[in-house]
Amino acid sequence: MLGWYNISMSIDEEQSKFFGEALKCFDKALEIDPNYTYAWVSKGLAFFNKKDYDQALVCYDKALEIDPNYTYAWNSKGLALSNKNDYDQALKCFDKALEIDPNYRDAWTSKGNLLLTKMTLIKA
């Protein structure tokens, strides 16, 4: 299982032209284990990097359906929502991650960046 996940991560990060091949790898990992949350989030990150936030959210939601306490998925979902300018829902995702793990530094950073963005929008 981990082998397919690791291969797909390296392909996805190498260049965007390998996007389709990366998705095949994520899908193969998910064929082997449909409950493999890391593969769902990785597939979501691939879509996120292509700025396809709707598809990314589908993947993050699937990971959270499997493991509702998966803080990385909550944070990733919040980032996708933030990029869709859905700041209130994004904030709820960061807060959910922090409710699960109050020491989750990525969620603290994401929440802080979102609050700065909201502050900038209010000033504009």
Image (cartoon, helix red, strand yellow):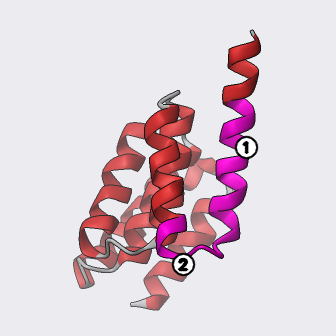
Residue denoted by label 2: 7
Left or right of 51? Residue 110 is right
User: 122 or 66, which lies in front?
Assistant: 122
Observer able to see residue 66: yes
Left or right of 43? Residue 83 is right
Which region of the structure is painted magenta? 98-117
In x, y percent, where is residue 77? 46, 52
In the rendered structure, which amino acid carries the disc numbered 2? Ile
Observer able to see residue 47: no
Residue denoted by label 1: 113
Q: Is residue 13 magenta?
A: no
Question: Badge 2, how many Cα within 10 Å: few under 14, some, many 20+?
Answer: few
Left or right of 36? Residue 3 is right
Q: Residue at x 24, y 66 (%)?
A: 65
Q: Secondary structure at mark 2?
A: helix
Q: Residue at x 25, y 84 (%)?
A: 32
Work out whether mark 2 precedes mark 1 in sequence or the reverse, and give the earlier one: 2
Q: Secondary structure at mark 1?
A: helix
Cα separation, mark 2 vs mark 1, equals 31 Å
